Image: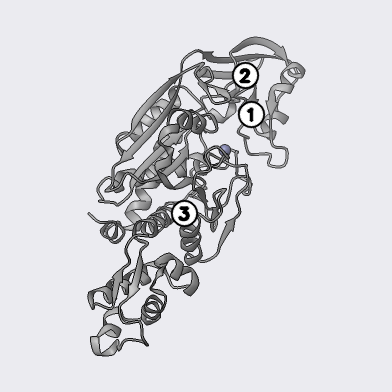
Amino acid sequence: MTLDELRAGVDAATLGRELYDCVTDLYPLCRSLTGDGLRETLRRLQRRVPLTVHEVPTGTPVFDWTVPKEWNIRDAWVKNARGERVIDFRRSNLHVVSYSVPVRRRMSLAQLRPHLHTLPDRPDWVPYRASFFNETWGFCLSQRQLDALEDGEYEVCIDASLEPGSLTYGECYLPGESSDEILMSCHVCHPSLANDNLSGIAIAASLGHYLRQVSLRHSCRILFLPGTIGPITWLARNEAAVGRIRHGLVLVCLGDAGRFTYKKSRRGDAVIDRAAAHVVRQAGDHVVEEFSPYGYAERQYCSPGFNLPVGRLSRTPHGCFPEYHTSADNLDFVRPGQLAGSFAACLDILDVLEHDRVYVNQSPRCEPQLGRRGLYREVGADEMAMLWVLNQSDGQHSLLDIAERSGCAFPALRRAAAALERHGLLKEAPVR
Ligand SMILES: [Zn+2]
């Protein structure tokens, strides 16, 4: 199958359902930086995408960091004097601060309070908190739940383990014609949060699933990594091979109703930056952000020692929607149509990366007579695309250059170039 056939053949409604089903399936799992929730997530993804699962032992040095202890949790609760679970991990995994050390003791509400986290401004929402590199414990609950707690003694239990084990990540490699790679990367370390975490995971998995069936020029590498330590570990283990990465995208927060936001790589003018900016511009209302050393895995890919051409595609960026890192980032917050739209944008970007070419106009002295060749009929309404391609194809400007200058959509320019080439008016330039 070609990429064009894939883009034409995948029905948006079916795709939206598939993506949303994936989010729904993974939503209840208690993912964290390490541990069985993350492993189970990758195991379920393996049904859909050919994924190699790597385990890196605790204590492994990775650049300036060390692979942490592995965290697993079985149960957690706070019980009141009547033995009722007033905070219950089984109701939502957000109730426990991720990476909490094990606890089993009785204490007063006053002693418990410093370990309780709420969102006073959003009294019905439960915040998401993690403490990965500082050994502590805590619970998260709604402000209303906290207000309802009576004075008295509570029994506190976090039945968790924080022990030497390993860090788990998943990697899918799809060989193309060339060893030049397109990298796609998502984070897999958040528990029941739908947009921040699962939307990117579902889209990355579906990209792997569908692109496996497509012949591409580039090879594709799709990474499912826990935040921060994940990309650091991957880069430390693959340092010698990162030179093959020609373009890369971090996929995150892609299921909400917001407009697209593309954050540029540190380079700022990489082909991926221009391709993604073009695609989100064509999609309508959008934002293109300059690089900043904050955010997700792009922080590591774009550290100065690597400086990889990796940008980030989101809808509303992290921290910019009130539901971010709360129980309201749930299965209602992401919608099938929005997920499908984001998936389509990824394919559109891929289309530019795969098909950007430089041509030479074979009849450059004045305009060739297009009507005589039936070209107006052939390309229909895309007369402007045809004129732009003819005018700019001097062996110096690629189709993406022409798209930027003309405002024409890349697919229209591609179609025009193909028609002109069929009629002998255009020839691909020798590779520079
Ligand atoms: Zn997050």
Q: Quadrant of the C terminus?
A: bottom left
Nearer to us in this view, 273 or 192: 273
Q: State the residue at coordinates (43%, 38%).
A: 242
Q: Secondary structure at mark 3?
A: helix
Question: Which numbered circle lies on residue 78?
Answer: 2
Nearer to us in this view, 26 or 7: 7
Q: State the residue at coordinates (62%, 42%).
A: 294
Q: Is residue 308 left or right of residue 77?
A: left
| Mark nearer the viewer, 2 or 3 | 3
Q: Quadrant of ligand 1?
A: top right
How are the colours assigned in the image? one colour
Q: Secondary structure at mark 1?
A: strand
Q: Residues within 10 Å of mark 2 (few under 14, many from 20)?
A: many
Q: State the residue at coordinates (46%, 15%).
A: 165
Q: Mark 1 or 3 closer to N-term?
A: 1
| Mark nearer the viewer, 1 or 3 | 3
Indicate the position of residue 133 as horizontal and vertical percent values: 62, 23
| Mark nearer the viewer, 2 or 1 | 1
Q: Which residue is mark 3?
A: 272
Q: Could you tell me the amino acid type at mark 3?
A: Ile
Q: Is residue 395 left or right of residue 70?
A: left
Nearer to us in this view, 320 or 287: 287
Indicate the position of residue 201 as horizontal and vertical percent values: 43, 40
Q: Residue furthest top?
A: 105
- Asked if the residue under mark 3 is in contact with the one under mark 2, i.e. CB atoms within 8 Å, the reply is no
Question: Which numbered circle lies on residue 140?
Answer: 1
Q: Could you tell me the amino acid type at mark 2?
A: Val
